[in-house]
Image: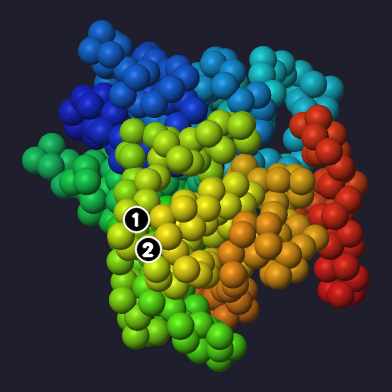
Amino acid sequence: MCGILGVVARTPVNQLLYDGLQVLQHRGQDAAGICTVDDSVFHMHKGPGLVRDVFRTRDMRNLHGCSGIAHVRYPTAGSAMNPAEAQPFYVNSPFGIVLAHNGNLTNTAELKEELFRQDLRHLNTNSDSELLLNVLAHELAAQARGAELDVEGIFAAVAAVHRRCRGAYAVVALIAGYGLLAFRDPYGVRPLVYGSNMTDDGPEFLVASESVALDTLGFSLVRDINAGEALFIDFGGSLYTRQCSETPARLPCLFEFVYFARPDSVIDGLSVYQTRLAMGEQLARKMRDIGGFEDVDVVIPIPDSSRPSAMELAKHLGVDYREGFVKNRYIGRTFIMPGQASRKKSVRQKLNAIASEFEGKNVLIVDDSIVRGTTSREIVQMARDSGAQKVYFASAAPPVRYPNVYGIDMPTSSELIASGRTDAQIAAEIGVDRLVYQDIDALMRMLGEANQQIDGFEASCFTGCYLTGEITPDYLDALQASRGDASVRAAQRQLDLTLAESD
């Protein structure tokens, strides 16, 4: 998962892009980068670390120009912590192109072979973003054929990218001498919105992963870039859009609403905050139906993303809501830290319990999701150490049972606590008296009713149903082998069952 920005403005954009990256920092803490363009000359600075650590005053002064793109990286493909894979990426042919990408390509082996054998292009890293950049560069060159590009040629190149690339991708790119290009994969898995700002000198445009970046930077949200759609803004400020996919389907990532996106964002017409409130209401409905939670004394969220669900859950259960954990905001989000040892070590550094809210009580702890179970297990133990009599646990999301291959760092079943386990077994693993999960069908129905223009959701980590056809048990086996981890036979067995049921 990454965060991307692209802007065409009337004044220098270095500070604007920096501020935008700060707002999107939750989408990636591994690396950050900014590239601006001034009179067809690119100025770039990038490196590993948080935004505030990557950029110094001298770096900002060198980022000249009134247009640019920016990126914060959370690695899901390529080499974690490899400075060479910080984005944006650059190629000098044709014209000079700089690109930043959020998502994950799933046919990388095929594309690498095509680029090397047919397109005669060389890659310097294992990043699928560099791969995507070179595919786009090749298709733009094919449209130009030694002549000037036009808008029709740019959109034709994006259509060719859609035909060649599979997976999830939201992209911003600068084309030297032309303008800013942004596009979204034909399923619209990864979010991308754009907004405008009118100045005395003319319009300015900003493209971002989340609408919150537009809000904080003074831009008015226009709309989401649609699945398969491309948007091109020339450096003069003229905007063009085109649907570049023959078969687009609006299927945004469900996990964005559960966990990744900020609650003050709106994605594909859905308020993230409102969807999280609705998740809590739905959980309360399920808990009343199944019974056994009548002795809950207090509902306590795990900060921060579970708060809306926990508040609504407490309201509909008629139980007190309390803050029982204090978060140290100077520790990174444990879910996106690169190593299991780092994740386990950081939980106690990140959260501390308020003992008085637990002592002698039956507590219901609410989290947005349970992925690896490491954080959940440590938190439950904290509650017991603080004197809780009983500890119940509710997940605002369904069980995460399958690898994700579209840009979220949970690609192997060995890391997923719900893979191959029943709810009772998971409860025993994390040490709770009882566990309740959100129902996937109820969740998707609820969100679908909130915006009927959405065709569905990318929910493969919950359902095992993948949008792109190449995700087979053999694909998962190769993915596991490439990471050097243990086998993914459990996920493969579950995928086999899912495929058999769909037949």
Give above or below for 159 relative to 451. above
The residue at the point 17 percent across, 41 percent down is 202
Which mark, residue 355?
1
Which mark, residue 469?
none
Along the horizontal axis of the image, is 197 left or right of 458?
left
The residue at the point 56 percent across, 88 percent down is 291
Kind of residue at disc 2: Glu
Residue 189's image quarter? bottom right
Along the horizontal axis of the image, is 270 left or right of 394?
left
Considering every residue shown, the one lying at the far bottom of the view is: 289
The quadrant in which the C terminus is found is bottom right
In the picture of the structure, the residue carrying the numbered disc 2 is 359
Kind of residue at disc 1: Ala
Considering every residue shown, the one lying at the far top of the view is: 58
**Front in this rendered view, residue 72 or 488:** 488
Percent position of residue 48, x then y: 47, 19
Residue 71's image quarter? top left
